[in-house]
Image (cartoon, rainbow, N blue to C red):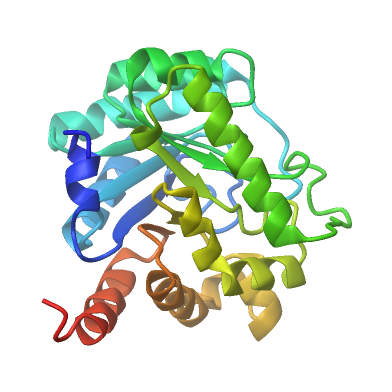
């Protein structure tokens, strides 16, 4: 393992928790709640107190149907929050949730130590930013763009196609100079996938461990849970917790969530039972 803060965290026996912090007006779950810098920082500090290992800060919604924003607007939303959060708690491990190279570079300069990119560094210049700064990066699978991705997505074999895409991106990123041990993968639940695609990906999650990278799962409050339970976003906590436990059992290393304390508690109990007698 490389000697970085996240690599040290990844040696922990429990999955890491990534707390979601959207500084956007239109994110599907908490849009508009943390536009104010002070409120955003306070929420980040609360999530850290509740057990979050990573704070994932995003300034552009990638929910289905969302329109893109300019790099300048995204920077205005995220940079002051990153700077203020690190001033309040300097050891915070911050991930920047963006697909724009300019935002990646500025966020890293401000103190972000990870890039979480729904486009898997496919934007021109994105791989170079990560390679030159040696930060961690999460490569996610997405078919299409947020404004079109949920319009009748089709696959011949969703598990094989997503896995092959991520394998190819890992190879291309390492060829560009990104250290393989700095790469994390995310199958991209809800990003260009129908419910049956999401369920099959989840059911076969352990197959992605053969790519030999840490695995990030992001299903918190998502529409797949809403479709199964027929519940609005604000009532999907129980379903999100069920997903977190199953993800942990199937080998997820990082679980991205909105509800930190509830996820931390359910994982602490579940993993204590699962790991009993294994020491």
Q: Is residue 195 above or below residue 109?
A: below
Residue at image location 33% in from the left, 26% down from the top:
135
Give the answer, above or below, for where 67 lies relative to 211: above
Q: Where, quadrant-wise, is the N terminus in this rendering?
A: top left
Quarter-wise, where is residue 168 in the image? top right
147 vs 86: above or below: below
Let me know if residue 190 appears in the view: yes
Question: In this view of the protein, which residue sits in the foreground, 255 or 249?
Answer: 249
Q: Residue at x 38, y 70 (%)?
A: 248
User: Looking at the image, is 71 positioned above or below residue 206?
Assistant: above
| Residue 224, image x, y percentages | 66, 70
Residue 215: image location, x then y, percent: 43, 53
Residue nearest the observer in this picture, 256 or 57: 256
The spot of residue 199 in percent (x, y) is 66, 73
Q: How many marks?
A: 0
Residue 253 horizontal side relative to residue 6, left or right: right
Q: Residue at coordinates 37% horizontally, 27% vertically from top-left? A: 179
Q: Quadrant of the C terminus?
A: bottom left
Q: Residue 84: give x, y in percent of width and height.
A: 24, 29
Q: Can I make out residue 62 in this image? A: no
Task: Pick whichever, 55 or 231, lies toward us.
Answer: 55
Left or right of 122 in this view: 244: left
Kindly identify the residue that appears in the image at 16 percent across and 33 percent down.
3
Q: Is residue 196 left or right of residue 46?
A: right
């Amino acid at each position: 393992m490389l000697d970085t803060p996240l690599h040290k965290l990844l040696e922990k026996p429990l999955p890491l928790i990534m707390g979601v912090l959207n500084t956007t007006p239109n994110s599907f779950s908490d849009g508009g709640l943390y536009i104010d810098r002070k409120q955003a920082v306070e929420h980040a500090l609360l999530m850290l107190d509740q057990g979050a290992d990573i704070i994932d800060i995003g300034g552009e919604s990638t929910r289905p149907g969302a329109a893109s924003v300019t790099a300048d607007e995204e920077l205005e939303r995220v940079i002051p929050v990153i700077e203020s959060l690190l001033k309040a708690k300097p050891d915070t491990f911050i991930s920047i949730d963006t697909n724009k190279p300019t935002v990646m570079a500025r966020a890293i300069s401000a103190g972000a130590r990870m890039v979480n990119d729904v486009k898997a560094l496919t934007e021109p210049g994105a791989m170079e930013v990560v390679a030159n700064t040696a930060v961690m990066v999460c490569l996610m699978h997405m078919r299409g763009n947020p404004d079109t991705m949920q319009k009748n997505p089709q696959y011949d074999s969703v598990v094989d196609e997503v896995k092959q895409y991520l394998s190819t991106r890992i190879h291309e990123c390492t060829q560009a100079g990104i250290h393989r041990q700095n790469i994390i993968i995310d199958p991209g639940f809800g990003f260009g996938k129908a419910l049956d695609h999401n369920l099959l990906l989840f059911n076969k999650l352990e197959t992605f461990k053969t790519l030999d990278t840490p695995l990030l799962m992001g299903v918190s409050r998502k529409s797949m849970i809403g479709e199964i339970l027929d519940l609005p976003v604000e009532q999907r906590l129980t379903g999100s917790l069920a997903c977190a436990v199953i993800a942990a059992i199937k080998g997820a290393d990082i679980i991205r969530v909105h509800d930190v304390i509830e996820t931390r508690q359910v994982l602490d109990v579940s993993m204590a039972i699962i790991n009993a007698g294994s020491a």
